[in-house]
Image (spheres, rainbow, N blue to C red):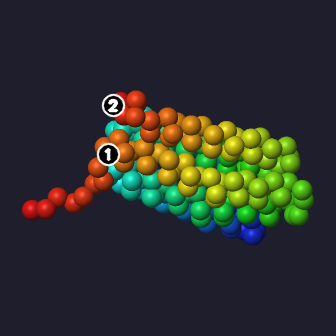
Amino acid sequence: MFTLYHFFFLFLTILILVYMYRVFQGPTVYDRILGLNGVSTKAILLLTILGSLYGRLEMFVDIALGYALLNIIGGLAVGKYLEQKRTREC
Amino acid sequence: MLTVDTLLIFIGLFFLTVAAIGVIRLPDVFSRSHALSITDTLGTFFVLTGVACYQGLTLADVKVFLILFALWHLNPVISHAVLRAALRNGVRPWVKEKK
């Protein structure tokens, strides 16, 4: 049975593919980082939609929370690393 | 069939689509980041509120709003850090060419 939540799931997957175009194609490294940030935000939304689809939101929302924190730490670490004077040439 | 939760998620998907079009079409990294911030504010708000409305009021809804709080407060920090690195490393903002 194809419900509306299956449609939401497919739609978010297509949006992730659109962001992956920017990740692979981006002219500078900052485009790629921001594209990955968008992909992980979509992945968090996808996990909560998946939890609603299976009827077990209380399990999937913990995974989504952990993924959100990982995304934040990763993005900040790469951003501060690229700002150093030593890496300015790349 | 169109209940409150699916209506909210449809509105959220509209904003997510607009943000994706902006990320593909806009000319440089600063304006792309501006398009991406639509995802972080309106898109996640509507989608996560719709998901929270789906099962009624449970403990999972508190965690869903915790995710929303984290995304709202910490995604602008990431964008700021990355774009400040871009500006200090010599990426010039795009301007329209004068004739």
- Decide which of B3, B28 is in the foreground and name it: B28
Secondary structure, mark 1, is loop
Residue drawn at the location 48% of the way across and 60% of the way down:
B18
**As drawn, which residue projects farthest toward the front?**
A85
Provide the chain ID for the residue under circle 2: A
Residue drawn at the location 28% of the way across and 54% of the way down:
B94
Residue A1 in view, yes or no: no
Q: CA distance from mark 2 to mark 1?
A: 12 Å
Residue B72 in view, yes or no: yes
Residue B10 location, x and y as percent? 63, 63
Residue A73 location, x and y as percent? 63, 40
What is the quadrant of residue B3 in the picture?
Answer: bottom right
In the displayed structure image, the side of residue A27 where residue B17 appears, left or right: right
Q: Mark 1 belongs to which amino acid?
A: Val
Q: Residues within 10 Å of mark 1 (few under 14, many from 20)?
A: some
Quadrant of the rendering where the C terminus of chain A is positioned: top left
Which disc is residue B91 wearing? 1
Whether label 2 touches label 1, CB < 8 Å: no
What is the quadrant of residue A40 in the picture?
Answer: top right
Residue A4 location, x and y as percent? 70, 56
Residue drawn at the location 57% of the way across and 42% of the way down:
A76
Residue drawn at the location 83% of the way across and 58% of the way down:
B62
Q: Mark 2 belongs to which amino acid?
A: Glu
Residue B25 sits above or below residue A28 on the image: below
Instruction: Read off the residue under disc 2.
Output: A89
Q: Are marks 2 and 1 on the same chain?
A: no
Residue B76 location, x and y as percent? 56, 55
Which disc is residue B77 wearing? none
Which of discs 2 and 1 lies nearer the camera? The answer is 2
Provide the chain ID for the residue under circle 1: B
